[in-house]
Protein backbone atom coordinates (compact mmCIF):
# COMPACT_ATOMS: atom_id res chain seq x y z
CA UNK A 1 0.00 0.00 0.00
CA UNK A 2 1.41 3.41 -0.96
CA UNK A 3 2.37 5.89 1.73
CA UNK A 4 0.09 8.94 1.91
CA UNK A 5 1.46 12.46 1.70
CA UNK A 6 0.71 12.94 5.41
CA UNK A 7 2.95 9.95 6.15
CA UNK A 8 5.76 11.13 3.86
CA UNK A 9 9.24 11.13 5.23
CA UNK A 10 10.62 14.64 5.66
CA UNK A 11 13.82 16.24 6.93
CA UNK A 12 16.38 13.75 8.21
CA UNK A 13 14.09 10.81 7.48
CA UNK A 14 13.79 11.83 3.83
CA UNK A 15 17.56 12.28 3.60
CA UNK A 16 17.96 8.78 5.00
CA UNK A 17 15.61 7.46 2.30
CA UNK A 18 17.66 9.15 -0.42
CA UNK A 19 20.92 7.78 0.94
CA UNK A 20 19.32 4.34 1.20
CA UNK A 21 18.64 4.46 -2.53
CA UNK A 22 22.27 5.43 -3.23
CA UNK A 23 23.49 2.61 -0.98
CA UNK A 24 21.20 0.15 -2.77
CA UNK A 25 22.56 1.27 -6.16
CA UNK A 26 26.16 0.90 -4.92
CA UNK A 27 25.36 -2.58 -3.63
CA UNK A 28 23.78 -3.60 -6.94
CA UNK A 29 26.75 -2.38 -8.95
CA UNK A 30 29.07 -4.55 -6.88
CA UNK A 31 26.93 -7.65 -7.39
CA UNK A 32 23.90 -8.07 -9.66
CA UNK A 33 22.42 -5.06 -11.41
CA UNK A 34 18.63 -4.86 -11.38
CA UNK A 35 17.48 -3.57 -14.75
CA UNK A 36 14.13 -4.03 -16.50
CA UNK A 37 14.11 -7.16 -18.69
CA UNK A 38 14.30 -5.08 -21.88
CA UNK A 39 17.64 -3.60 -20.88
CA UNK A 40 19.14 -6.94 -19.84
CA UNK A 41 18.17 -8.38 -23.22
CA UNK A 42 19.76 -5.44 -25.01
CA UNK A 43 23.09 -5.75 -23.17
CA UNK A 44 23.26 -9.47 -24.01
CA UNK A 45 22.34 -8.68 -27.61
CA UNK A 46 25.09 -6.08 -27.88
CA UNK A 47 27.67 -8.62 -26.72
CA UNK A 48 26.42 -11.01 -29.41
CA UNK A 49 26.46 -8.32 -32.10
CA UNK A 50 30.07 -7.48 -31.22
CA UNK A 51 31.04 -10.96 -32.38
CA UNK A 52 31.64 -10.79 -36.16
CA UNK A 53 31.23 -14.58 -36.40
CA UNK A 54 27.84 -14.70 -34.65
CA UNK A 55 25.31 -16.46 -36.94
CA UNK A 56 22.20 -14.54 -38.01
CA UNK A 57 20.05 -17.32 -36.51
CA UNK A 58 21.53 -16.74 -33.06
CA UNK A 59 21.13 -12.96 -33.35
CA UNK A 60 17.50 -13.22 -34.44
CA UNK A 61 16.79 -15.61 -31.55
CA UNK A 62 18.21 -13.05 -29.11
CA UNK A 63 16.22 -10.20 -30.69
CA UNK A 64 13.01 -12.22 -30.51
CA UNK A 65 13.23 -12.23 -26.70
CA UNK A 66 11.96 -8.65 -26.69
CA UNK A 67 8.72 -8.10 -28.69
CA UNK A 68 9.19 -4.32 -28.78
CA UNK A 69 12.68 -4.55 -30.27
CA UNK A 70 11.48 -7.18 -32.74
CA UNK A 71 8.55 -5.09 -33.95
CA UNK A 72 10.63 -1.92 -34.32
CA UNK A 73 13.34 -3.81 -36.21
CA UNK A 74 10.83 -5.17 -38.72
CA UNK A 75 9.21 -1.75 -39.07
CA UNK A 76 12.55 -0.06 -39.78
CA UNK A 77 13.61 -2.78 -42.22
CA UNK A 78 10.36 -2.29 -44.15
CA UNK A 79 10.47 1.53 -44.10
CA UNK A 80 10.75 3.45 -47.35
CA UNK A 81 14.37 4.30 -46.52
CA UNK A 82 15.48 0.66 -46.22
CA UNK A 83 13.06 -1.27 -48.41
CA UNK A 84 13.83 0.36 -51.75
CA UNK A 85 12.43 -1.99 -54.42
CA UNK A 86 12.80 -5.22 -52.46
CA UNK A 87 9.97 -7.32 -51.00
CA UNK A 88 8.89 -6.66 -47.39
CA UNK A 89 10.76 -8.53 -44.66
CA UNK A 90 8.51 -11.06 -42.95
CA UNK A 91 10.96 -12.45 -40.42
CA UNK A 92 13.73 -11.19 -38.14
CA UNK A 93 16.58 -12.87 -40.01
CA UNK A 94 15.80 -11.09 -43.27
CA UNK A 95 15.27 -7.79 -41.39
CA UNK A 96 18.68 -8.08 -39.70
CA UNK A 97 20.37 -8.88 -43.01
CA UNK A 98 18.70 -5.86 -44.64
CA UNK A 99 19.59 -3.17 -42.10
CA UNK A 100 22.87 -4.66 -40.82
CA UNK A 101 24.04 -5.64 -37.36
CA UNK A 102 25.36 -2.16 -36.51
CA UNK A 103 21.91 -0.66 -37.02
CA UNK A 104 20.35 -3.50 -35.03
CA UNK A 105 22.71 -2.72 -32.14
CA UNK A 106 21.80 0.99 -32.07
CA UNK A 107 18.10 0.35 -32.60
CA UNK A 108 17.92 -2.22 -29.79
CA UNK A 109 19.63 0.12 -27.35
CA UNK A 110 17.38 3.01 -28.32
CA UNK A 111 14.24 0.94 -27.79
CA UNK A 112 15.54 -0.29 -24.42
CA UNK A 113 16.39 3.25 -23.31
CA UNK A 114 12.93 4.43 -24.27
CA UNK A 115 11.28 1.56 -22.37
CA UNK A 116 13.46 2.30 -19.35
CA UNK A 117 12.62 6.01 -19.30
CA UNK A 118 8.94 5.86 -20.25
CA UNK A 119 7.95 2.80 -18.22
CA UNK A 120 4.67 2.84 -16.31
CA UNK A 121 6.61 2.82 -13.02
CA UNK A 122 7.98 6.28 -13.82
CA UNK A 123 4.58 7.99 -13.92
CA UNK A 124 5.51 10.17 -10.94
CA UNK A 125 8.64 11.31 -12.81
CA UNK A 126 6.91 11.63 -16.17
CA UNK A 127 8.08 15.17 -16.94
CA UNK A 128 11.78 14.67 -16.26
CA UNK A 129 11.87 11.16 -17.75
CA UNK A 130 10.34 12.31 -21.05
CA UNK A 131 12.69 15.30 -21.24
CA UNK A 132 15.62 13.02 -20.49
CA UNK A 133 14.54 10.64 -23.28
CA UNK A 134 14.30 13.50 -25.78
CA UNK A 135 17.68 14.85 -24.66
CA UNK A 136 19.33 11.41 -24.98
CA UNK A 137 18.05 10.98 -28.53
CA UNK A 138 19.14 14.50 -29.53
CA UNK A 139 22.59 13.98 -28.00
CA UNK A 140 22.97 10.64 -29.79
CA UNK A 141 22.02 12.26 -33.10
CA UNK A 142 24.45 15.14 -32.50
CA UNK A 143 27.27 12.74 -31.65
CA UNK A 144 26.70 10.72 -34.82
CA UNK A 145 26.69 13.89 -36.94
CA UNK A 146 29.92 15.12 -35.32
CA UNK A 147 31.58 11.73 -35.90
CA UNK A 148 30.60 11.73 -39.58
CA UNK A 149 31.95 15.25 -40.00
CA UNK A 150 35.25 14.94 -38.13
CA UNK A 151 36.00 11.22 -37.96
CA UNK A 152 37.94 10.00 -34.89
CA UNK A 153 35.32 7.28 -34.20
CA UNK A 154 32.53 5.63 -36.16
CA UNK A 155 29.11 7.25 -36.27
CA UNK A 156 27.60 4.10 -34.75
CA UNK A 157 29.94 4.18 -31.74
CA UNK A 158 29.28 7.90 -31.27
CA UNK A 159 25.52 7.36 -31.44
CA UNK A 160 25.74 4.55 -28.86
CA UNK A 161 27.80 6.73 -26.51
CA UNK A 162 25.32 9.58 -26.90
CA UNK A 163 22.37 7.34 -26.06
CA UNK A 164 23.97 6.05 -22.85
CA UNK A 165 25.74 9.24 -21.70
CA UNK A 166 22.95 9.93 -19.17
CA UNK A 167 22.31 6.29 -18.27
CA UNK A 168 23.05 7.17 -14.64
CA UNK A 169 20.11 9.60 -14.58
CA UNK A 170 17.83 7.06 -16.26
CA UNK A 171 18.80 4.33 -13.81
CA UNK A 172 18.42 6.60 -10.78
CA UNK A 173 14.88 7.53 -11.83
CA UNK A 174 14.07 3.85 -12.35
CA UNK A 175 15.42 2.95 -8.90
CA UNK A 176 13.69 5.95 -7.24
CA UNK A 177 10.37 4.63 -8.57
CA UNK A 178 10.81 1.62 -6.27
CA UNK A 179 10.44 3.84 -3.16
CA UNK A 180 7.00 5.20 -2.24
CA UNK A 181 8.40 8.23 -0.42
CA UNK A 182 10.65 9.25 -3.30
CA UNK A 183 7.89 8.83 -5.90
CA UNK A 184 5.87 11.38 -3.96
CA UNK A 185 8.83 13.78 -3.81
CA UNK A 186 10.03 14.09 -7.44
CA UNK A 187 11.79 17.41 -6.81
CA UNK A 188 14.09 15.97 -4.17
CA UNK A 189 14.87 13.06 -6.51
CA UNK A 190 15.66 15.46 -9.35
CA UNK A 191 18.24 17.20 -7.16
CA UNK A 192 19.77 13.85 -6.22
CA UNK A 193 19.93 12.77 -9.87
CA UNK A 194 21.67 16.00 -10.84
CA UNK A 195 24.33 15.51 -8.16
CA UNK A 196 25.10 11.84 -8.79
CA UNK A 197 24.09 10.82 -12.32
CA UNK A 198 27.53 11.23 -13.93
CA UNK A 199 29.51 9.09 -11.47
CA UNK A 200 26.77 6.47 -11.18
CA UNK A 201 26.41 6.35 -14.96
CA UNK A 202 30.11 5.75 -15.53
CA UNK A 203 30.16 3.00 -12.88
CA UNK A 204 27.06 1.40 -14.43
CA UNK A 205 28.65 1.27 -17.87
CA UNK A 206 31.75 -0.44 -16.48
CA UNK A 207 29.55 -2.87 -14.49
CA UNK A 208 27.59 -3.73 -17.64
CA UNK A 209 30.78 -4.52 -19.55
CA UNK A 210 30.38 -1.64 -22.00
CA UNK A 211 33.70 -0.90 -23.78
CA UNK A 212 36.00 1.21 -21.62
CA UNK A 213 36.33 4.04 -24.14
CA UNK A 214 32.56 4.57 -24.09
CA UNK A 215 32.33 4.54 -20.29
CA UNK A 216 35.22 7.00 -20.00
CA UNK A 217 33.72 9.24 -22.71
CA UNK A 218 30.66 9.93 -20.52
CA UNK A 219 32.78 11.19 -17.60
CA UNK A 220 32.00 14.75 -16.42
CA UNK A 221 29.93 15.46 -19.53
CA UNK A 222 27.82 18.02 -17.63
CA UNK A 223 30.84 19.89 -16.24
CA UNK A 224 31.20 23.02 -18.43
CA UNK A 225 34.62 23.46 -20.01
CA UNK A 226 35.96 25.08 -23.18
CA UNK A 227 34.75 23.36 -26.34
CA UNK A 228 37.75 22.21 -28.43
CA UNK A 229 37.99 23.67 -31.91
CA UNK A 230 37.87 20.14 -33.31
CA UNK A 231 36.99 16.91 -31.44
CA UNK A 232 40.06 14.86 -30.56
CA UNK A 233 38.35 11.70 -29.34
CA UNK A 234 35.03 10.15 -28.24
CA UNK A 235 35.09 12.07 -24.94
CA UNK A 236 35.10 15.37 -26.85
CA UNK A 237 32.34 14.15 -29.16
CA UNK A 238 30.05 13.19 -26.25
CA UNK A 239 30.72 16.48 -24.48
CA UNK A 240 30.07 18.56 -27.60
CA UNK A 241 27.00 16.51 -28.54
CA UNK A 242 25.60 17.04 -25.04
CA UNK A 243 26.18 20.80 -25.30
CA UNK A 244 24.52 20.89 -28.74
CA UNK A 245 21.51 19.11 -27.22
CA UNK A 246 21.19 21.65 -24.42
CA UNK A 247 23.11 19.85 -21.67
CA UNK A 248 21.51 19.09 -18.32
CA UNK A 249 19.67 22.43 -18.48
CA UNK A 250 17.45 20.82 -21.12
CA UNK A 251 16.15 17.85 -19.13
CA UNK A 252 16.45 19.37 -15.64
CA UNK A 253 14.49 22.49 -16.67
CA UNK A 254 17.12 24.61 -14.93
CA UNK A 255 17.85 28.20 -15.82
CA UNK A 256 20.95 28.59 -17.94
CA UNK A 257 24.08 29.52 -16.03
CA UNK A 258 25.65 32.43 -17.93
CA UNK A 259 29.18 31.60 -16.77
CA UNK A 260 28.73 27.93 -17.69
CA UNK A 261 27.38 28.93 -21.09
CA UNK A 262 30.45 31.07 -21.72
CA UNK A 263 32.80 28.19 -20.88
CA UNK A 264 30.89 25.83 -23.18
CA UNK A 265 30.57 28.21 -26.13
CA UNK A 266 30.03 26.38 -29.42
CA UNK A 267 32.18 27.48 -32.35
CA UNK A 268 31.23 27.75 -36.00
CA UNK A 269 32.28 24.17 -36.94
CA UNK A 270 29.55 22.87 -34.62
CA UNK A 271 26.93 25.56 -35.15
CA UNK A 272 27.02 24.69 -38.85
CA UNK A 273 25.93 21.14 -37.92
CA UNK A 274 22.72 22.16 -36.09
CA UNK A 275 20.45 21.52 -39.10
CA UNK A 276 22.09 18.12 -39.66
CA UNK A 277 21.57 17.34 -35.97
CA UNK A 278 17.86 18.21 -36.20
CA UNK A 279 17.46 15.98 -39.27
CA UNK A 280 19.31 13.10 -37.60
CA UNK A 281 17.21 13.54 -34.44
CA UNK A 282 13.98 13.34 -36.41
CA UNK A 283 15.21 10.20 -38.22
CA UNK A 284 16.22 8.57 -34.93
CA UNK A 285 12.85 9.36 -33.35
CA UNK A 286 11.14 7.93 -36.43
CA UNK A 287 13.08 4.67 -36.05
CA UNK A 288 12.46 4.38 -32.30
CA UNK A 289 8.95 5.73 -31.78
CA UNK A 290 6.02 3.45 -32.39
Image (tube, rainbow, N blue to C red):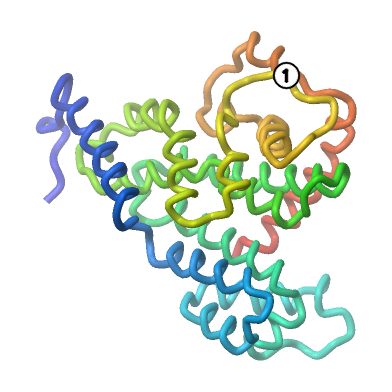
Q: Quadrant of residue 180?
A: top left
Left or right, residue 145 beside residue 188: right
The x, y position of residue 85, in whole percent, is: 89, 85
Left or right, residue 14 beside residue 64: left
Residue drawn at 22 percent across, 44 percent down = 179
Which residue is at the front of the view, 216 or 229?
216
Outermost residue on the top side: it is 259
Q: How many marks?
A: 1
Left or right, residue 41 beside residue 137: left
Left or right, residue 6 beside residue 37: left
How busy is the neighbourhood of tag 1: few (under 14 within 10 Å), some, or many (20 plus)? few
Q: Is residue 176 visible?
A: no
Residue drawn at 73 percent across, 49 percent down = 281
Residue drawn at 64 percent across, 89 percent down = 91
Q: Is residue 180 visible?
A: yes
Which residue is at the front of the view, 265 or 215?
215
Q: Quadrant of residue 146?
A: top right
The x, y position of residue 27, in whole percent, is: 26, 46
The x, y position of residue 266, in whole percent, is: 79, 24
Q: Quadrant of residue 193?
A: top left
Which residue is at the front of the view, 244 or 160?
160
Up-down relation of residue 19 to residue 1 (above or below): above
Label 1 element class: loop
Locate the C terminus and report the quarter of the image it occupies.
bottom right
Label 1 belongs to which residue? 226
Up-down relation of residue 238 to residue 258 (above or below): below
Residue drawn at 56 percent across, 34 percent down = 219
The x, y position of residue 214, in whole percent, is: 61, 47
Amino acid sequence: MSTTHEEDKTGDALKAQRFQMLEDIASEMSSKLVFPTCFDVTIRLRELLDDPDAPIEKISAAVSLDPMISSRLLSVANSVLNRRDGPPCKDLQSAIMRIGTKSVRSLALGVAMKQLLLARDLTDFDGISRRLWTHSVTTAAACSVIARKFGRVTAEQALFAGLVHDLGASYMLYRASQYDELRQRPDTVKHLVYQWHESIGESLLFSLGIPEEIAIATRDHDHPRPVPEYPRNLTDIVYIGNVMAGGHFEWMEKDFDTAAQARAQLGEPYLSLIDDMKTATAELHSALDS
